[in-house]
Amino acid sequence: MEEHTIYKDMEDDINSSNLNENTKKKVFNNIFKLKKQKVNLMITGATGSGKSSTINAMFNLEVAKIGTGVDPETMDIKKYELDNLILWDSPGLGDGKEKDIEHSKGIIKKLNELDKDGNPLIDLVLVILDGGSRDLGTSYELINSVIIPNLGENAKDRILIAINQADVAMKGRYWDFENNKPKSKLVNFLEEKSKSVKNRVKEATGVDIEPIYYSAGFKEDGEAQRPYNLSKLLYFIVTNTPIKKRLVFVNSTSDDKDMWSDSDEIKNYTNEIQKSFIETIIEVAKDAGDIGEDIGRVIGAGKTGKVIGTVLGTAIGTVKAIGSKILSFFGW
């Protein structure tokens, strides 16, 4: 998907709408502000936790610009630029004391870096844990001693903990390979593991975090990668991102529907993500005046609704159907 596709579609929809010229001008100004929004997401965890497989499954890295830091203390952190989404992939901890100290310094330095407006550069930190490991000592050290102390007063709003490799959490037992989901006994085990992680972090830092579990899926030669709960993970990332920055994820997430098809049935996470994108547009419209309903109708019936409706490789249907869903969500 080409750069800023959704913003161009928004502009086309506004131009072809019946909104008055003054309103159009205000909305265009706010769309321009949206275009400049960037999200900096740091992804970290212990060696072997599955950071690379998660990044490859979730994001469209084929179009990413790849680089590293220029500072000696951060040069081991890989940087992926996907349009306005910047991923910071830090080296895994657990390869020796000296290496861990070196990598921890790099993470701390990046977490304390400020943007041009004086705000923390990193919007959100995703810490990935190895669900198949009984020893999470390195991960707790990373979370409790390195990350949370360097996130400031609103630490709970800037950190997510995700337990990967749910499929091998009990050495492969109680995983339904045919349907790619955990059986009830494994679900109970993963729920308890999540509670344990939450309690350990709370006791050490006072910060209340709700971990989720998933599987990025292991890709062997000739076999397709089959993640589980990846859409739930993206849902948590998107909804914990400041609302005016959420559209950044529209152009950067994988459009392979197989990456998002298998999840628990607690929520329809794909639909929830799409609603979050719509909320962003409505929030921006409010900045332009009392025109939220008009904007909702415009994007629901036009190109923008179609783009949002097909994000994550999940085609909802015709533009009319998408518009109906959007308007229904807002009670219009």
Image: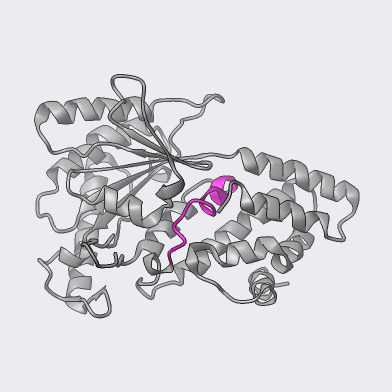
* Residue 308 is one of the magenta-drawn residues: no
Residue furthest toward the front? 222
In the rendered view of the protein, which quadrant contains the C terminus?
bottom right
Color theme of the render: one colour
* Residue 247 is one of the magenta-drawn residues: yes
Q: From the viewer's perspective, tell me whether residue 165 is left or right of residue 259.
A: left
Percent position of residue 215, x then y = 27, 62
Rendering quarter of residue 183: bottom left
How many circles with numbers are drawn on the protein?
0
In-front residue for pair 307/291: 307
Residue at (20, 48) in percent of width and height: 200
For the record, the magenta segment spans 244-256
- The answer to whether residue 288 shows anywhere in this view is no
**Is residue 237 positioned above or below 30 on the image?**
below
Residue at (49, 51) in percent of width and height: 252
- The answer to whether residue 113 shows anywhere in this view is yes
Residue at (9, 55) in percent of width and height: 134
Residue at (77, 45) in percent of width and height: 28
Percent position of residue 298, x then y = 76, 63
Residue furthest toward the bottom? 178
Percent position of residue 47, x then y = 17, 43
Q: From the viewer's perspective, tell me whether residue 318 is left or right of residue 237.
A: right
Percent position of residue 306, x then y = 64, 66
In-front residue for pair 112/173: 173
In the rendered view of the protein, which quadrant contains the N terminus?
bottom right
